[in-house]
Amino acid sequence: MCPKLTPLVACFDGVVRLGRGRGTAGNTISVRGDNGWTVNYYHVNNDSPGTNDGTSPEEWVFAPGLQSGQRVTAGQFLGYSGNSGNAESTAPHCHFELWDSVTGVCVNPHVSLLAATKLETPQAKLVQAKVEVKKGESRWDGVVRAVDTAAGTLDLELWSKTEGGKAKSVTKSTRVKVKWADSTKGQVLGNENIDVKLTEVRAGLQAVLVGKSGNTGIQPRLALFAPPG
């Protein structure tokens, strides 16, 4: 049992599968682990904050940019607890199942959960770990949600924010406005010799922004982009 919208995290490295409104389980998250185990999280949230409306708002179900087939790492934010499916009339909770992927047997996860490392907050998801951040700058990692070439801006839904060299996971749905200036250097992550213009940026791309924030939003010195996934 836990409050609605409690962040759910991956308990081990593996590949994630997401399900929306599938029968009694409601919205679901599954991780097939590299360790030979599969974990299922059932009754993932399907309500707008403060309601029980069942509308499954995108930003309050799964983590920003998370898609089936993606690799996840232990401690990574996956989504929010809730009471979807046949739990609509119950208090919010996470129905947690642990399966042996080889034998297909479901085991009692109690001992494993007691032995697991406990986190105060999810581990920060970084699109790429090694990105130069100069003194006085911050870093933002996330997924592009909208681009306005006429206004010279893009909207970024955050995964994490790094200040003073410390990365923190963002678990409350947060979108920030990014002002693209003439001095902004856009590049392709992993192939930094390719320059990117704002007109080439599209919704769904992963992004790393480095720079400073002001009254009008983030003003990046450097913007790195990568395909979804």
Image: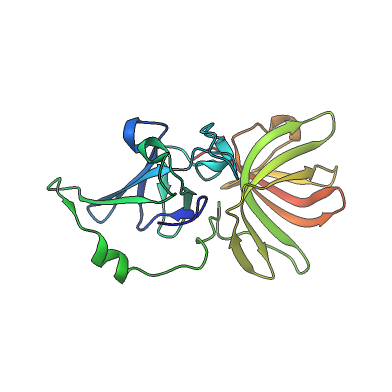
Name the residue: 44% across, 49% down.
92
Residue furthest to the left: 103
Examine the rendered structure and indicate whether residue 96 appears above or below residue 86.
below
Examine the rendered structure and indicate whether residue 168 appears above or below residue 157.
below
Examine the rendered structure and indicate whether residue 227 appears above or below residue 113.
above
Question: Which scheme is used to colour this image of the protein?
Answer: rainbow
Residue 38 position, x and y percent, is 27, 49
- Position of 220 compared to 166: left or right? right
Q: 220 or 65, which lies in front?
A: 65
Name the residue: 48% across, 42% down.
45
- Position of 22 compared to 106: left or right? right
Name the residue: 58% across, 60% down.
130
- Position of 104 compared to 43: left or right? left
Q: How many dots with numbers?
A: 0
Residue furthest to the front: 89
Q: 89 or 214, which lies in front?
A: 89
Residue 202 position, x and y percent, is 65, 31
Residue 42 position, x and y percent, is 36, 44
Location of residue 111 (image quadrant): bottom left
Location of residue 157 (image quadrant): top right
> Can you say which quadrant of the picture contains the N terminus?
bottom left
Name the residue: 20% across, 58% down.
108
Q: 156 or 219, which lies in front?
A: 156
Residue 217 position, x and y percent, is 81, 49
